[in-house]
Image: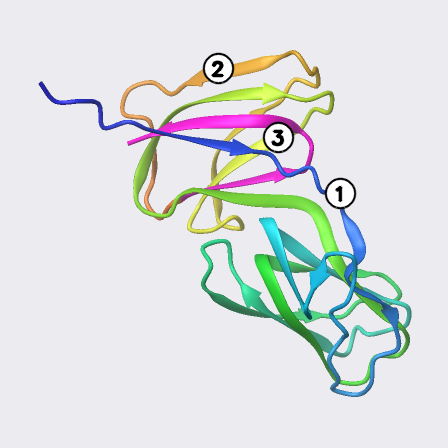
């Protein structure tokens, strides 16, 4: 008698709030110079997160004509580098999610102080290969929000969403009919922190 080929994965949501200077504190940055990785999230000159996050870079001046190179690892632990165009007295956010951040370097001369941190959008990997999502069980928090299932990466194509209810005692039990939803290049989760407590998914 053969067993089920369905695999369950439980994700405990990240509750770490957005931190605009958690990677690098507000400071002047020289021409083509690296930011000092020494914020509250840093240890020994780098940042390691429990769930991958997008990186925010806040410019006090007009940095729209320059960029910042973010080096670290992606949600799967593989090396990742992204060039983020600077903002004009505003916040620029990376497109990719970083699990670790090793360095952030200005490409050009920042017009004023710069700080770097993380957004409130988090990501987790359920399964990195081809799989069919069969269902999920979610425990809500007091804050409602969407849980977005994507393929290829946390920034990839959205194939399914479920929402938390906004009640600390509420749950959601979703069963996908027939063969489930096919994720040809992995099942990745994107969500806003603290919008659910735990999420158990079932895939085959």
Residue 188 visible in rendering: yes
Q: Which residue is mark 1?
A: 17
Residue 110 lies in what quarter of the image?
bottom right
Question: Which residue in the rendered view is the most extreme toward the front?
Answer: 44
Find out whether residue 65 is within the magenta segment: no
Q: Please state, as top left, top right, bottom left or bottom right, where the N terminus lies in the image.
A: top left
The residue that appears at 65% across and 73% down in the rendered structure is 103
Camera-near label (2 vs 1) is 1
Residue 186, position as x, y percentages in the image? 38, 45
Q: Residues within 10 Å of mark 2 (few under 14, many from 20)?
A: few
Residue 133, position as x, y percentages in the image? 36, 30
Please determine whether, in this image, residue 144 is positioned above or below residue 53: above
Q: Which residue is mark 2?
A: 173
Residue 105 lies in what quarter of the image?
bottom right
Camera-near label (3 vs 2) is 2
Q: Is residue 147 left or right of residue 178?
A: right
Classified by dominant secondary structure, the portion drawn in magenta counts as strand
Q: Is residue 176 left or right of residue 2?
A: right
* C-alpha span from label 2 to label 1: 27 Å
The residue that appears at 73% across and 20% down in the rendered structure is 142
Q: Which mark is residue 131?
A: none
The residue that appears at 83% across and 80% down in the rendered structure is 29
Please determine whether, in this image, residue 89 is positioned above or below residue 154: below
Region of the chain picked out in magenta, as a range? 187-204
Q: Decide which of tag 1 and tag 3 comes sooner along the chain.
A: 1
Residue 52 visible in rendering: no
Q: Which residue is mark 3?
A: 146
* C-alpha span from label 3 to label 2: 14 Å
Q: Secondary structure at mark 3?
A: strand
Q: Please state, as top left, top right, bottom left or bottom right, where the C terminus lies in the image.
A: top left
Q: Secondary structure at mark 2?
A: strand
């Amino acid at each position: 008698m053969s067993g089920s080929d369905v695999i369950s994965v439980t994700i405990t949501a990240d509750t770490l709030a957005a931190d605009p200077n958690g990677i690098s504190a507000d400071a002047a940055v020289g021409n083509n110079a690296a930011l000092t990785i020494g914020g509250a999230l840093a240890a020994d000159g780098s940042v390691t997160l429990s769930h991958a996050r997008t990186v925010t870079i806040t410019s006090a001046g007009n940095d729209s004509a320059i960029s910042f190179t973010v080096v670290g690892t992606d949600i799967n632990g593989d090396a990742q580098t992204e060039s983020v165009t600077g903002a004009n007295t505003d916040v620029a956010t990376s497109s990719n999610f970083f699990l670790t951040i090793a360095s952030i370097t200005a490409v050009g001369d920042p017009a004023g102080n710069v700080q770097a941190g993380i957004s409130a959008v988090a990501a987790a990997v359920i399964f990195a290969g081809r799989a069919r999502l069969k269902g999920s069980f979610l425990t809500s928090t007091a804050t409602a929000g969407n849980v977005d299932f994507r393929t290829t990466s946390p920034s990839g194509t959205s194939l399914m969403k479920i929402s938390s209810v906004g009640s600390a005692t509420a749950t959601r039990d979703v069963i996908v009919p027939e063969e489930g939803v096919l994720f040809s290049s992995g099942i990745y989760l994107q969500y806003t922190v603290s919008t659910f407590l735990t999420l158990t998914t079932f895939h085959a």
